[in-house]
Image: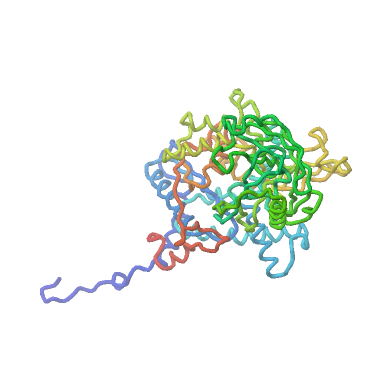
Amino acid sequence: MPKDGSFPDIPEIFLKPYNAQEHEDRIYAMWEQSGYFNPDNLPGDRTEPFSIVLPPPNVTGTLHIGHAYEDTLQDIIVRYQRMRGKKTLWIPGTDSAAIATQARVEKNIQKAEGKTRHDLGREELVKRVHAFAKESEGTILNQVRKMGASLDWSRYAYTLDEKRNIAVFTAFKRMYDAGLIYRGNRIVNWDPKGQTTISDDEIVYEERDAKLYTFKYSADFPISISTTRPETKVGDTAVAVHPDDERYAQYIGKEYDIMFCEVPLHIKIIADKGVEKDFGTGALGVTPAHSHMDWEIANRHDLPRPQVINEYAKMTVDGPLNGKKVLEAREYVVEWLRAQNLLEKEEMVKQNISTAERTGGIVEPLPKLQWFVDVKKQVEFLDGRVMSLKERMHEAVASGDVRIEPERYERIYFHWIENLRDWCISRQIWFGHRIPVWYPIGNPGGSSGASRDEVRVQVESPGAGWEQDPDVLDTWFSSALWTISTLGWPEETVDLATYHPTSFMSPAYEILPLWVSRMILMSTFHLGQVPFKQVLIHGLVRAKDGHKFSKSRGNGVDPLDMIAQYGADAL
């Protein structure tokens, strides 16, 4: 400061508060123009690779603050490894999220035009969904750039672009030829409102009050059972008890013919270790067609599986229940039990109800003819070893080839793998990768009657006289190929040889079993490598009420709003 106490002239720019809007776009444009996000352009002699694929956000709308959190974690690691002199690649991309995106567009069309997808037809609906996805994609990419993510945009990928389409078809064909993909009648999560199967991750469990009913099938039946769904008991084929439960030991192996609510039943008493002795009466009415657990029990004991509820959540049995909605049927059965003096007890309990995230409909476990990936079949891998997909998925982590941190999530992973069922990969929607299977027109019984020898697995039509399977693949099928498809597989590219296995993955804990495990499944089978070396699990950014951010709830915070107010660095 001068001796006279006056202040020197200070440039006005230093007197103004910092305005991020005036600088951040310019800085990011400068970064992109430098080309240094592309590892091929980095200075120096870089030989050690480091790679991450961005978990592709769904093109169902816009990103929320949770995406910003995940992108920031990865960007910090990528920039650090780049500064250390590694040949660092961070691949951007987006996911079609087929079922979620179609549901969003259908909802918009219904609201604006009062039309359903069937009013529009397949071609027109798919066209509109593609247009919506393209617009959403542009918004998302702008958001990611605004956040300053140092992604190599020259390698951008979309799960429905041509290169990924080739990867999906190649994977399907190889797995089909190996006997790992089959069409079969198995129990699935069915959304009656959306009229499609859904995956476990698309289920929201809502705690609700429910009544637990305890009753006997008939006055002469020796065992009481407890259930919250008495309407399904018209589909029972057995009563299961624990083999160590002395209360019921004398009845094991006995069979009974019963008339229950005017529906004839043949019930066998069986012993199964899956029964909880302390729940209800300790006896389980086995409804194979309408419970995942009961389906497995039926498999173990070779029980019949009569279906008594259809795709519209209505009863199909003959008699007074026929055509009733499940809740109406429940009331009818309870009144019938009261009239017959068979109802022993009613009590209120808390129950987790499975609802579809996209539609809010109550999910019905139903047996459906669907496409599955067989996780238990013994198959030869590229290294010549023979094992199941399930065993290989377990080995990848147990051997240390994939490190999951924090360590407690390894236990969660192993528990999920141990209880893994065959993966249902077909969806009854129109947007997405259509199943590349063709059936001869006029085949007895339609496509359901076609054998493996009669179908053709290819992208293009075999010619006149053939019809394609109407279903599309579960969006997780293409997502599971993400680390290899973004690097050029099925071609043997330089990128694939250089950057795979990728170095790091940082997903939220909720998709550890649904995405991380399936990437391990696909990569080990198709490439003989794990997809990544390290998985760092992070938590979720939640709304004030504790719910996770979701587009369907509309509770997400747009990172662009935060950036406009505080700047990307502060975010």
Residue drawn at x 48%, y 41% is 51
Instruction: Choose between 351 and 426: the one closer to the eye.
Output: 351
Q: What's the image's color scheme?
A: rainbow
Asked if residue 459 lies left or right of residue 26, the reply is right
Residue 119: horizontal and vertical position, in percent?
78, 63
Quadrant containing the N terminus is bottom left
Whole-percent x, y for residue 101 in the image: 64, 57
Closer-to-camera residue (293/393): 293
> Could you say where residue 459 lies in the image, as x and y percent from the top left?
75, 43
Q: Position of residue 500 (x, y in %)?
A: 52, 36
Of 112 and 411, the residue lying toward us: 411
Quadrant in which the C terminus appears: bottom left
Residue that appears at 64% across and 60% down? 104
User: Vertically, is 138 above or below 245?
Assistant: below
Q: Is residue 430 above or below residue 419?
A: below
**Within the image, what quadrant is residue 288 found in?**
top right
Name the residue rendered at 65%, 37% in the picture: 422
> Is 36 positioned to the left or the right of 305 in the image?
left
